[in-house]
Amino acid sequence: MAAPEHAPAPHGADGSTPAAPHTTGGTAAEGHGSGGLPQFDPAWWPGQIVWLLIIFVVIYVMMKRVFVPRVGGTIAKRNEQIAGDIAAARELKAQAEAQAEEAAAETAQARAQARRLAEDAKGRARAEAQERQAAEEARIAARMASAEADIRAAREKAMANVRTVAAETAEAIVEKLTGQAANKVEVDRALAGRA
């Protein structure tokens, strides 16, 4: 069978094509009444409000029961950890300050004791030196009357004894201060350097 030939569209008297007849079915957009989106049609609003309330309640319950407690628990744990770290730091600082005060007190006590020992050693050495010097001066004074030569000899002897006294005094001071016997070679070297 041959395909039917399409008849040319009828033209009006002025040559224009007539408008298509209006159908009762219309398009999908025309069927909604507003001619636009269905969510703006008041007929759909009750269902939309119900779904909005359901979604809001679900989100609210999940936020209240799941998300907010987790975030709150994390914040509480972090605050507890920070508070614990601060307390530990304060305790360590207090311990360090107490140890520093104890060390300062021990240092001050050791310095005072060292000063006392040094003063005692100096006093004893001075007393011994004065006694020896007085004895030497008495001997020298007794011999002065006899002769000038004896005086010169006594002076040389006294000078030799002063070096010996100084060496012995230095050895005694070192032994008293350090608690160990002094090395005679180092004492002689020190006395030679001062001389």
Image (cartoon, grey):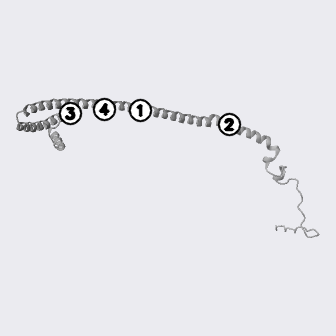
Q: Which residue is mark 4?
A: 111
The amino acid beneath tag 4 is Arg
On-image quarter of the N terminus: bottom right
**Residue density around tag 2, few if under 14, some if 14–19, many if 20 or more, within 10 Å:** few
Q: Nearer the viewer, residue 110 or 162?
A: 162
Residue 150 lies in quadrant: top left
Which mark identifies residue 97? 1
Mark nearer the N terminus (1 vs 2): 2
Mark 1 → mark 2, Cα distance in angstroms:
53 Å
| Of labels 4 and 1, the one closer to you | 4
Residue 144 visible within the image: yes
Q: Residue furthest front?
A: 145
| Of labels 4 and 2, the one closer to you | 4
Q: Which residue is mark 2?
A: 60
**Residue density around tag 3, few if under 14, some if 14–19, many if 20 or more, within 10 Å:** many
Mark nearer the N terminus (4 vs 1): 1
Question: Is there CB contact under 8 Å for labels 3 and 4?
Answer: no
**Residue density around tag 1, few if under 14, some if 14–19, many if 20 or more, within 10 Å:** few
| Of labels 3 and 1, the one closer to you | 3
Mark 4: which secondary structure?
helix
Which mark identifies residue 125? none
Q: Nearer the viewer, residue 30 or 94?
A: 94
Mark 4 → mark 2, Cα distance in angstroms:
73 Å
Mark 3 → mark 1, Cα distance in angstroms:
37 Å
On-image quarter of the C terminus: top left
Question: Is there CB contact under 8 Å for labels 4 and 1?
Answer: no
Q: Which residue is mark 3?
A: 173
The amino acid beneath tag 2 is Tyr
